[in-house]
Image (cartoon, helix red, strand yellow):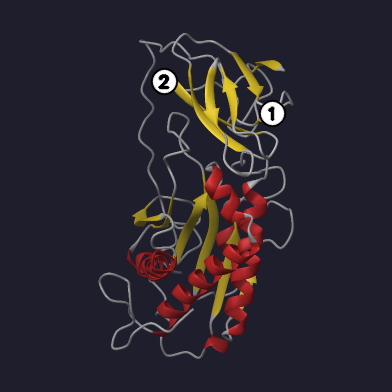
Amino acid sequence: MIATILLAAAPIVAFPSEGARLPAIDKVYLIGSTRKGDTNVVVNGESVSVYRTGAWATMVDVSEGSNDVSVASQSGESTNVWFRIAKKPVADPNATPAPPKVWEKLEYAKDEAKEPPTNKAPCEITIVLDPGHGGSDTGAVSPHGFFEKDANLLTAVRVRKELESLGYNVVMTREDDTFPSLYDRPKVAHAKGADAFVSIHHNAPPYDKDPRELRYHTVYSWNDIGEALSKAINARMAAEFDGEFRSNGNMHANFAVTRNPEIPSCLIEADFVTSPAGEEAIWNAERRARMARAIAAGIDDWCRGPVSASGASREGSAPSAP
């Protein structure tokens, strides 16, 4: 069965609204799934290998601006296609460059950072966990059509369980499929007098990057107090998944949920939902528990005391087992 898919309108996930267009690039990625057991699909006449779950990913040439993509599965059954392609736009030579964005701190946050909770017992420490996206904001989508918002919530719920078992107070910005606004999420930490804010996400590549090759975990922060927290978490994740998929280390970003000079804040990208291997790992309950234990252990490390320059251990002692 050959399915010709017209992809100009009603885009899914990759585009925020109907009629949105790709930047001026020559290739974009396409992901999808077919029947488990198929070994390949054919996209625009080229064979694409299929992961053991039935997931597949490939790059599609859009240099000619075509909107038509033909997809055929080995078994003859239909295959899901989740990221859609729009025509390559023509750059406007007379367009005025957009002014650079000026990022400012959250207006309600104090300028002075809170003291790290190193002298507090866990029962005196409040951690806010933020499962990214939710509601109509699905986030990224996996080859089988699973939404990032659900992976974020599943992981956050498990992290809460791990932290509560260590004695911490945990507050969630959402506990179901709802969408707190972007700037309301860090307000929860402010209202609760939280000691730390941790936003949990799962990643997707830019349109022109190959999802078969791009897979890592990383933790983002905005300032020094967030960086100490993110380093502690990333160190635990890197140790837990060494040899399975790589760590991209601690990175800096001007995300709304990390721009808090008062409360240590970070954003975790735990894996790539667009990677067939990443998709399989994310929705595996045992592996998700390992990720949650690593994140919780990193938060615990940070709460107990300063980490070393590498973020790998607490000052004066080796980190405890997750």
Front-lying residue, 32 or 8: 32
Q: Quadrant of residue 190?
A: bottom right
Q: Position of residue 138 (x, y in %)?
A: 66, 43
Instruction: Bin the neighbour count of mark 1 within 10 Å (Cα to Cα): few under 14, some 14-19, many 20 and up.
Output: many
Can I make out residue 293 in this image?
yes
Front-lying residue, 147 or 125: 147
Q: Position of residue 56 (x, y in %)?
A: 57, 35
Residue 79 shows which numbered tag?
A: 1
Element on which disc 2 rests = loop
* Quadrant where the N terminus is found in the figure: top right
Mark 2: amino acid: Ile
Residue positioned 46% across, 8% down in the render: 64
Q: Earlier in the sequence, mark 2 or mark 1?
A: 2
Image height of 143 relative to 231, above or below: above
Element on which disc 1 rests = loop
Question: Mark 2 — residue?
Answer: 25
Instruction: Bin the neighbour count of mark 2 within 10 Å (Cα to Cα): few under 14, some 14-19, many 20 and up.
Output: some
Q: Position of residue 292 (x, y in %)?
A: 56, 68
Image height of 112 relative to 14, above or below: below
Front-lying residue, 317 or 226: 317
Q: Are marks 2 and 1 in contact (CB under 8 Å)?
A: no
Residue positioned 38% across, 82% down in the render: 319
Front-lying residue, 67 or 275: 275
How many angstroms separate mark 2 from mark 1 (CA)?
26 Å
Q: Position of residue 15 (x, y in %)?
A: 59, 29
Image height of 121 relative to 142, above or below: below
Can I make out residue 173 in this image?
no
Can you tell which of label 2 and label 1 is closer to the viewer? 1
Mark 1: amino acid: Thr
As drawn, is 201 to the left or to the right of 27?
right
